[in-house]
Amino acid sequence: MTPEIDDHFAALKAEHGSSSLDRVEEMLEPRRRSDLRHPFQQAAKWVLPGIPQVPWHDPYGYPELLPLVKALEEHHPQIKAEQEAAWAGSRDSFSDYQHYLVRQRNWQALYLYRDGALRPESEPVAPTAYQVLKEHAVDTSVICPLLESHFSTLLPGAAIKPHCDLWNFSINLHLAIDIPEGAGLRVAEEARTWEEGKCLLFDYSFEHEAWNHGDRTRTCLLADLWHPDTTLPERSALTVLMTEIQKMMAG
């Protein structure tokens, strides 16, 4: 680890107790990494021990996330209308989604939050979603600053190949905006479809894939949130740790 990481970890332990980062430090032990993985998590890079190995989660089951889930679902009609207007009249607000350095032209994204901050240029385009995300995810610190929130639009015929995301200490929330027949999502061994206006929640450290076999676009609003089973000191440590790792990898 770097001096910056060591200093931050030491400060957190001094404030929250010497055992507050035990799980984070255990995650970093090479001999333990393969032992912690569910069979469908084998390709995940980082697996924090003690996180329940459950692919699908109840979006209404976590008090910390419930205000965001309720607000997104309550505002679905406005969010959908604004997204449709943006798709029709502000297409330059969308970009090809780059998923782990692989760019997909048939997967379009309009970012609301990225690189640790809200994207103010998105507020005029999608004001309702922007405000809900700000009030119930950013201001409450349930969003994972290492990741993002965006409208995810799959064009007809698009498919996202099976893969595991990098870690299990954040969790992926989907609000179904516009769902055609023939669109679906598999996480581990279970495939589901989206119900328009409702949320899905899943652990994307498990192998997952998505597809749109419909005749129109499939759009969801995605938000990367802290897994509710992580603690505040762990979240702080993981933010600094992964930020430093990403800097080293980029350099």
Image: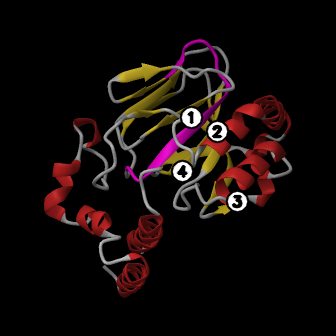
Q: How far apart are marks 1 and 4 (CA)?
A: 14 Å
Q: Does the magenta stretch include residue 166?
A: no
Question: Who comes first in sequence, dot 1 or dot 4?
Answer: 1
| Mark sitting earlier along the chain (1/2) | 1
Numbered disc in front, either 3 or 4 = 4
Judge by depth and name the residue closer to the eye, 59 or 239.
59
| Distance between the alpha carbons at the discs numbered 2 and 4 | 11 Å
Residue 69 numbered tag? 2
Q: Can residue 4 be seen in this view?
A: yes
Residue position marked by numbered label 3 in the rendering: 118
Give the residue at x 16% y 50%. Answer: 35
Q: Nearer the viewer, mark 3 or mark 2?
A: 2
Q: Mark 1 points at which residue?
A: 60
In the image, what residue occupies the spot 39% across and 84% down? 14
Q: Where is residue 112 in the image (x, y as percent from the top left)?
A: 70, 51
Check disc 3 and report its element: helix, strand or loop: strand
> How was this image coloured?
secondary structure
1, 230: nearer the viewer:
230
165 horizontally vs 195: left or right: left
Q: Residue at x 72, y 39 (%)?
A: 71
Q: Give the range drawn in magenta.
A: 168-184
Q: Position of residue 135 (x, y in %)?
A: 74, 54
**Residue 179 percent location from the top left of the image:** 64, 21
| Residue drawn at point x = 44 percent, y = 81 percent | 15
In the picture, residue 38 is in which quadrant?
top left
Amino acid type indicated by mark 4: Leu
In this rendering, the answer to whether 203 lies above or below 145 is: above
Q: Is the magenta stretch mostly helix, strand or loop?
A: strand
How many callouts does the rendering have?
4
| Mark 4 Cα-neighbour bin, 10 Å: few <14, some 14–19, many ≥20 | many
